[in-house]
Image: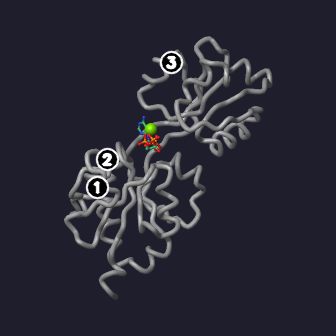
Amino acid sequence: MTQHSQQLTLALSKGRIFEETLPLLEAAGIKVSENPETSRKLILPTNDPNVQVIIVRASDVPTYVQYGAADFGVAGKDVLLEHGGEGLYQPIDLNIAKCRMSVAVRAGFDYDTAVRQGARLRVVTKYVQTAREHFAAKGVHVDLIKLYGSMELGPLVGLADAIVDLVSTGSTLRANNLVEVEEIMQISSRLVVNQAALKLKRERLQPILEAFEAASKRNA
Ligand code: ATP
Ligand code: MG
């Protein structure tokens, strides 16, 4: 095989996913040569001339990998559920960027009673698919309103009764007078691999996947 066909591109997002993937890369002998928080470059070289990292929005990682613009990437379960996972092989839960997806309401709003009485709830969320499935499974009628950020504001200004969002410490909810009333699921980030790359570049990918898997067990 030519050298070019064994070039590997890894898609990561800035922030916690990049930070928490670094130790896994190091376990595979890969060191990223620049820090995306200070560099403006979107393509970062590594100590391995055959491996490069591209920096994309967290919700765009599955798309780059699906179309083969990246061979592999790291994405949250939240993002993967919304994307749908087409064209992606998801071999490993990396046990990083852990949080939970929950329903929260304004303090004083009686969520349980509203649900029991069959009220129709307005819910703001970035996670429309996952929220739709959750409420459908519970038999709760909802009007879902898609937002791209600052979901916490929705109930405070009368846009919605509830939010579906990611929670880790709960401090953002508390700061906005919201209360977590239901956990939908635990979230962590997964390795995703382009299905064609997995076959064509197996020789190069396999040792990296094995190193990631071994290192991520320590985060479990
Ligand atoms: P942006 O912040 O650029 O709008 P984003 O919110 O999708 O995009 P991050 O905040 O870096 O990007 O989140 C990336 C992933 O990390 C999420 O998809 C989720 O899986 C996980 N995550 C998000 N919030 C938390 C959190 N508070 N604690 C732990 N993991 C989180
Ligand atoms: Mg964020």
Residue 206: image x %, image y %?
A: 35, 72
Badge 2 density bin: few <14, some 14–19, many ≥20, Cα 10 Å? some
Q: Which mark is residue 24?
A: 1
Left or right relative to 107: residue 90: left
Viewport quadrant of the N terminus: bottom left
Residue type at mark 1 is: Leu
Residue linked to disc 2: 20
Residue under the point 45% across and 52% down = 75
Residue type at mark 3 is: Asn
Q: Which mark is residue 167?
A: none
Mark 2 vs mark 3: in front: 3
Residue linked to disc 3: 176
Q: CA distance from mark 1 to mark 3?
A: 35 Å
Residue 123: image x %, image y %?
A: 67, 30
Nearer to us in this view, 197 or 61: 61
Residue type at mark 2 is: Glu
Total numbered labels: 3
**Disc 2 secondary structure class:** helix
